[in-house]
Amino acid sequence: MNAQDAPTTGDDGGRPDPFIDPRTLDPERAVVDTSGLADDEVDQIVRVLAALRRWRESEEASLDESRRTMQLGPTDMRAMRYLVVLKGRGDLATPSGLATHLGISTASVTKLLDRLEAAGHIQRQRHPTDRRGIVITLAADSHLRVREVIGRRHGRRFELAKDLRPDERETVIRFLNRLSET
């Protein structure tokens, strides 16, 4: 089967994507074994992979837009999300906790906090019970912006998952967990 005859993935104007469809990517089946599968089964699998690719690209674009809107780098944005979560749980955010969460050194956290503080996103305050320690608090407007940027997207995803039946959710969970292990 040549690329013209291969089924489409449904997202590219009718042309098959040779980087997803194993019939064009690996026609000798050296890497991807499609034996025993009917063409409609391969088509469906290709559609799953194409949908995953579209979701990944959409997620990357959304994260890029969030970082541009907030004028933050990827690690800075992860730090802001962490601070929002701790605030939501009623927990105190400390530099050492942030370092652990981000998997970076405390020296790197200090530089990160300097950037966030200079941009007006956070404040550092004395720890309420440890005179030597500090806690990190989000500036109110930054907290609202992060919740707006990330929260709305999360809310839409939650609604989509809520619309699935419990057995469908379990199927998605199993699939994504197995996919994460590849």
Image (cartoon, helix red, strand yellow):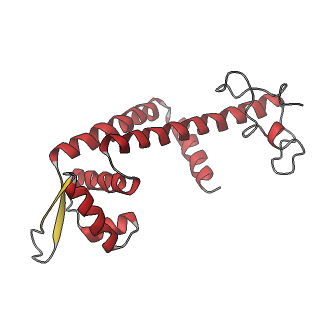
Residue 121 locus on image (x, y percent)? 21, 51
Q: Residue at x 30, y 44 (%)?
A: 70
Which image quadrant for residue 172?
A: top right
> Is residue 39 placed above or below 59 in the rendered structure?
above
Q: Which image quarter holds the C terminus?
A: bottom right
Q: Which image quarter holds the N terminus?
A: top right
Q: Examine the rendering and report whether any part of residue 125 can be seen.
A: yes
Q: Is residue 28 left or right of residue 72?
A: right
Q: Is residue 159 left or right of residue 168?
A: left
Q: Is residue 91 left or right of residue 151?
A: left
Q: Residue at x 9, y 68 (%)?
A: 128
Q: Is 168 in front, or is 149?
A: 149
Residue 26 locus on image (x, y percent)? 83, 44
> Is residue 77 placed above or below 39 in the rendered structure?
below
Q: Residue at x 49, y 31 (%)?
A: 164
Which image quadrant for residue 57?
A: top right
Q: Of all residues shown, which one is farthest toward the top?
A: 13
Q: Is residue 44 left or right of residue 126?
A: right
> Is residue 85 placed above or below 99 in the rendered structure?
above
